Amino acid sequence: MCEDGGILTYSFIVSIARKTGLSDPEGATTHKALTDLGFTGVSMVAFGRTISIDVEAMSQDEARSQVEAMCAKLLANPVMETYHIEPAS
Amino acid sequence: MTIAVVVFPGTNCEHDIVHALELAGADTEMVWHRDTDLRGADGIVLPGGFAHGDYLRTGAIARFSPIMDDVVTLATEGTPTIGICNGFQILCEAGLLPGGLVANRDLKFICEPVHIRVESTDSVLTRAAEVGQVLRIPLNSYEGNYVADNIQRIEAEGDVILRYSGSGGEVDDGTNPNGSTNSIAGITNAARNVAGFMPHPERASEAILGSTDGMVLIESFLASAELARA
């Protein structure tokens, strides 16, 4: 975080995952490869993606609500994805 | 009658679909994605390609292109609107069609002719076809695998208009090229004026291309645009 007249930079990591039950070919293929390699205890592999975002805002809450809005509007597709927002350490 | 063909950065099938639409007797106008006015077009086509590089998700950024406000307005008012391949992905992202498209089951880009069976003629894309009719049309996509979290409702309401099949119309895992849920290749909206599908009818629009099977879909669309205009 760097200070600039009350405005701070807040960093977040957004994790986006495919909704449970919907086709995840990357996960299924990787799961099979792991099993073929002898990792027999793997019961689930799911692919998603992470996006790092820095937001300049007056507070952590304000920054987070902006990231929430970004997820709802663009970053995730609510029809087939879920998202999770965490502050980056 | 004028059909607007929307061009995004990365769209690459606009000339092909314009050629096919004109073969079928339509006037066309290409509209750049930064434009904001479709000038009351009688029909709208979102063609195939890789709009905005397919970054983030296919169609995710294209749906916020300036022209999309007017696409949504006209489509909601009833203007016949179709999305081919990437255009289908954009219509899903825009919420004009249910569901979405993810990576193919075998993680392979598929570029080959496939068979599709007409499931319903109650759409702007299939009104001139016959239920059960099998068409052979090229597929050209990596994210062609249709998913939806409300698939039962989509099926129950008859929104599925095209399914991948064998040459005899058989539908099973073996005739499903990309793992699409229930072999779905194309769907329509509740109002039946918006339709999206993965195969490229413009690539099966003249004998020299190896098939003219795509023309029945293009002619359906133009007949729908003519009707909507009247």
Image (cartoon, grey):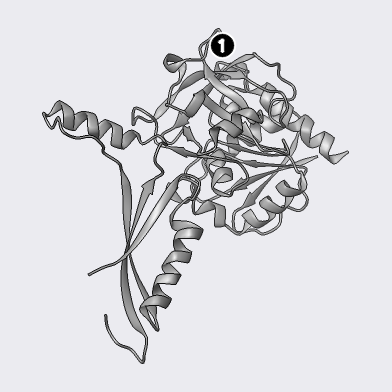
> Which of these two is toward me, B175 or B138?
B175
Q: Is residue B137 left or right of residue B132?
A: left
The quarter in which the C terminus of chain A is drawn is bottom left
Query: Residue B110, located in which quarter of the rendered image?
Result: top left
Query: Residue B150, located in which quarter of the rendered image?
Result: top right
Residue that extends furthest to the right in the rendered view of this protein:
B230
Residue that extends furthest to the left in the rendered view of this protein:
A38
Q: Position of residue B11 (x, y in %)?
A: 52, 44
Q: Chain of mark 1?
A: B
Q: Is residue B11 visible?
A: yes
Q: Which residue is mark 1?
A: B169
Q: Is residue B198 left or right of residue B190?
A: left
Name which residue lies at 82% across and 38% down.
B228
Q: Is residue B128 above or below residue B53?
A: above
Kind of element beneath mark 1: loop
> Which of these two is toward me, B185 or A84?
A84
Residue that extends furthest to the bottom in the rendered view of this protein:
A5
Q: Amino acid at mark 1?
A: Gly
Q: Is residue A35 above or below residue A78?
A: above
Question: Could you classify mark 1 by the number of other residues whose Cα lies within 10 Å: few (under 14), some (14-19), or many (20 or more)?
Answer: some
